[in-house]
Amino acid sequence: MALTPEVDFEDIEDGLEPIETSRTYYIDFDNGHITNELITGLEAIRQFVYIALHTERYSYSVFSHDLGNELQEVLSDSETTETYKKMEIPRLIEEALIYDDRISAVTDFEIEKKDDAFFVSFIVETDEGKLEIEEVIGEDV
């Protein structure tokens, strides 16, 4: 005699995967605080893009190895040409972003070198719409 009832549950499978939301807390990067304000949609994806572009991959054990980028190594290499760096920047940025299921493509790169920094603009195509991103990378290398 069992102490718990034996109940057969039917496997309910409708073929649909659960939809992950983009809801997250807003981070005030200017003041270095996580706020209690919740953000969703494009705003949440834009925040993820910012974090991915400003975090060196494998540098922080609190983050998954998926988060971050590997731009530092290429940009800090003094023996690498500017042409090579301009060629690698789109690939490295795309690798930093495309693993996120909300992002379908990273396109339309424009790269301009000024002093020691690269001014990069590109489009992030997401399930919520398109984001136009402009970043300065390599100025602190």
Image: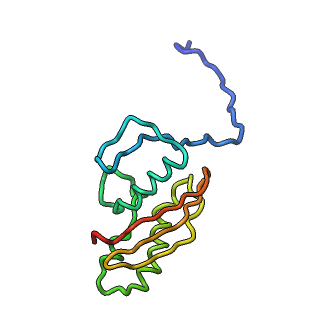
Residue 50 picture location, percent across and down? 42, 57
Residue 100 picture location, percent across and down? 52, 55
Residue 73 picture location, percent across and down? 33, 74
Check the image and report above or below for 106 versus 19: below
Q: Nearer the viewer, residue 96 or 12?
A: 96
Check the image and report above or below for 89 versus 65: below
Q: How many marks?
A: 0
How is the structure coloured here?
A: rainbow
Q: Nearer the viewer, residue 58 or 53?
A: 53
Q: Nearer the viewer, residue 123 or 78?
A: 123
Q: At 52% across and 42% down in the image, what residue appears? A: 40
Residue 21, quarter of picture: top right
Residue 94 picture location, percent across and down? 50, 67
* Rendered-image quadrant of the N terminus: top right
Residue 56, quarter of picture: bottom left
Question: Taking 37 as reference, is 104 left or right?
Answer: right
Q: Nearer the viewer, residue 141 or 65?
A: 141
* Rendered-image quadrant of the C terminus: bottom left
Question: Taking 81 as reference, is 102 left or right?
Answer: right
Residue 139, quarter of picture: bottom left
Q: At 47% across and 80% down in the image, what residue appears? A: 87
Farthest right residue in view: 14
Q: At 55% across and 58% down in the image, what residue appears? A: 131
Q: At 59% across and 59% down in the image, what residue appears? A: 125
Question: Taking 60 as reference, is 130 left or right?
Answer: right
